[in-house]
Every structure is written in C-alpha cells, then in structure tokens.
C-alpha cells in the first residue's frame, strides 16, 4: 500500500504498509506475516557446484567438458575424446555448496547452458583442450576410519 521513505539506518529497513484481502476473517490483530517481494525479473543464472569455480584475484573461471570437434563420424563405437575449455564467469550469489554464475563473455553463453558438465577437481592444473575422463564412481565421500566427519582424527585414550 505504501513505503515509508524514512528508513532505519542501523538495520537498513523501511517500514512498509501492506493491504491484504482477508475476506474469510482468518487474519487477526497481532499475527505475524511473511511476504515475498520480487525485486527483479526471474533469474536466468545457472547454479554450479562451489568446487567448479576457480577464483583468482583476476576473476573467476569454470572449466566445461566438451567433446573434441570432429571426433565422431557417426559409425564409430569409440567413445569421444572429452576436452576442457575455460570460461570466465561472474559470480552473482552463492550458498555453502553452490554459486550462481553467468559467463563474462557473450560468446561463451552457448558453453554455459543447463546440462553442461563442469570440472570439479583439479581445476588449478588444467590447460585449454586437456583431455579428461568422467569418473563414473558416484559413491558418497566418507571419512577415513578413525576420523570424525569433520576430518579430525579420533584419539583413543588408554588409561
């Protein structure tokens, strides 16, 4: 309904007055209300695992996995050679496990699309066009016996 222009500097908030259509009388005085306020258009960024982004002082990069050009002739039963290509990206937001990214260069937008495979291990050692293989082992990581999940070693005390 209205937004008060005199906000709180400490909390960086602005009082907002909202008008609700409560025809069934379910809202009562003193009840709390949570409201989602969209501040821009729906996001079109892609989410990648945090380990897929190599962050350096000069910018962030992901390495995409792609089939080598001209590898397949249609009848070959040999698996295609997979290579890596660096794509400079801008990190828009992040969580503990993932980054929302967009490519820095317009020409890379066809490389960064839903379903693109990205490298998540060994990013520091890659070079453009390096041949890679995809590890089919999807077993979850587990701590080494004698260690806590955090990696801290269990010390058994003998008294």
Image (tube, grey):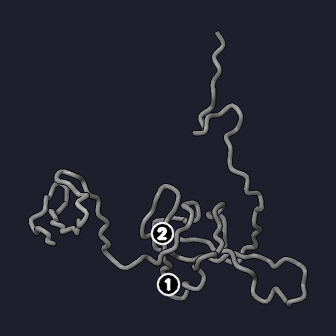
Q: Could you tell me how many numbered marks the image carries?
A: 2
Quarter of the figure that contains the N terminus: bottom left
Q: Position of residue 77 (x, y in %)?
A: 90, 80
Looking at the image, residue 150 lies above or below residue 16: above
Residue closer to the observer: 115 or 35: 35
Q: Secondary structure at mark 2?
A: strand
Q: Residue at x 74, y 80 (%)?
A: 67
Crowding at mark 1 (Cα within 10 Å: few <14, some 14-19, many 20+): few
Residue at x 10% of width, y 69% of height: 5
Q: Which residue was labeled with disc 2?
A: 100
Q: Is residue 126 left or right of residue 14?
A: right
Q: Quadrant of residue 20?
A: bottom left
> In the picture, which quadrant includes the C terminus?
top right
Whole-percent x, y for residue 78 in the image: 89, 78
Residue at the image position 9 percent from the left and 65 percent from the top: 6
Whether 100 is drawn above or below 30: the answer is: below
Identify the residue at the far left of this view. Answer: 6
How far is disc 1 from disc 2 in space, using C-alphas? 16 Å
The label on residue 11 is none
Which-is-in-front pick, marks 1 and 2?
Answer: 2
Q: Earlier in the sequence, mark 1 or mark 2?
A: 2
Give coordinates of residue 93: x percent, y percent: 42, 66
**Camera-side residue of 3 and 96:** 3
Tag 1's secondary structure?
loop
Q: Vertical placement of 147 versus 42: above or below? A: above
What is the residue that sits farthest to the top in this orientation? 159
Name the residue rendered at 81%, 79% in the picture: 80
Q: Is residue 77 left or right of residue 81?
A: right
Answer few, some or many: residues within 10 Å of disc 2's Cα (few below 14, many 20 plus, some between 14 and 19): some
Cβ–Cβ below 8 Å for labels 1 and 2?
no
For residue 142, above or below residue 82 = above
Which residue in the structure is indicated by mark 1?
A: 105
């Amino acid at each position: 309904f209205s937004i008060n222009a005199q906000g709180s500097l400490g909390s960086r908030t602005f009082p907002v007055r909202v008008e609700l259509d409560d025809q069934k009388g379910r809202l009562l005085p003193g009840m709390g209300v949570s409201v989602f306020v969209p501040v821009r258009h729906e996001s079109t960024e892609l989410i990648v695992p945090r380990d897929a982004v190599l962050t350096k002082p000069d910018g962030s990069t992901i390495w995409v996995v792609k089939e080598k050009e001209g590898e397949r002739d249609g009848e070959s039963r040999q698996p295609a050679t997979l290579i890596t290509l660096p794509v400079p990206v801008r990190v828009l937001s992040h969580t503990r496990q993932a980054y929302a990214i967009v490519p820095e260069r317009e020409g890379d937008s066809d490389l960064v699309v839903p379903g693109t495979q990205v490298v998540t291990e060994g990013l520091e050692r890659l070079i453009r066009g390096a041949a890679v293989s995809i590890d089919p082992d999807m077993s979850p990581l587990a701590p080494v016996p004698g260690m806590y999940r955090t990696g801290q070693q269990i010390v058994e005390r003998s008294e």
